[in-house]
Amino acid sequence: MFRGGPSVCVGKQAVLCLVLVQLCSISSADDREPILSANEACSNITGEYMFWGTFDVNGQEKPISFLQRLIRPSRVGVRWVRITQVSGVGEFAISFLDDEDRTIGKDIHLVSHCVSGKWEEMYSFEGNSDGTLVRGTRLWRYSRSEQGTLVVEYLGISSSQYFPGMTSYNKAQNRASFLQR
């Protein structure tokens, strides 16, 4: 587990350090469950869910689509989301269905790891478009509530460096719910 805190995050690697501090505060290495057997340690997320769900913004529920939650472009005519397990443990296919259960577009493949009973997918990004260096990490956690609702938690941490010495940090974190069909 990472020891220290944000005060030890300085220099060029500060963004990576802050991401590590944040991720370790969410789930310590001691809480991680190895993937040893098929899905027994993790929530079963396979099934069909409504395309539109809700998430909390300052105490008010707001609508969110499944594709918005994944930070993906919209698809016209989607009504349902189907999650099926593919060949390996932690590998899922996400299909988008219309009113007549026809697939719209290509499936999205989710490759995740079981951490503390939830399926976790994480990736880092780095880019430079207008001279601004952007670095960050995005983390999604998938689980199913006792009522059968799909819960997709999101954490995004990024930094933007406009000029040397001028860096801003951003964090977004929330939880969306999608009712079972």
Image: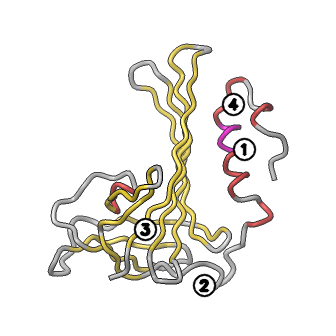
Tell us which disc is closer to us: 2 or 3. 3
Label 3 secondary element: strand
Upstream in sequence: badge 3 or badge 1? 1
Q: Residue at x 54, y 73 (%)?
A: 90
Q: Residue furthest right?
A: 3
Q: How is the image coloured?
A: secondary structure
Q: Which residue is mark 4?
A: 13
- Residue 17 on the magenta segment: yes
Q: Nearer the viewer, residue 173 or 57?
A: 57
Are discs 3 and 4 less than 8 Å apart at CB?
no
Q: Mark 4: which amino acid? A: Gln
| Label number found at residue 38 | 2
Mark 2 to mark 4 CA distance (whole Å): 37 Å
The mark that comes first in sequence, 2 or 1, is 1
Residue identified by numbered label 3: 177
Q: Position of residue 16 (x, y in %)?
A: 66, 37
Q: What are the residue bounds of the magenta stretch?
A: 16-20
Q: Position of residue 107 (x, y in %)?
A: 32, 68
Q: Residues within 10 Å of mark 1 (few under 14, many from 20)?
A: many
Say what secondary structure mark 2 lies in: loop
Secondary structure beneath dot 4 equals: helix
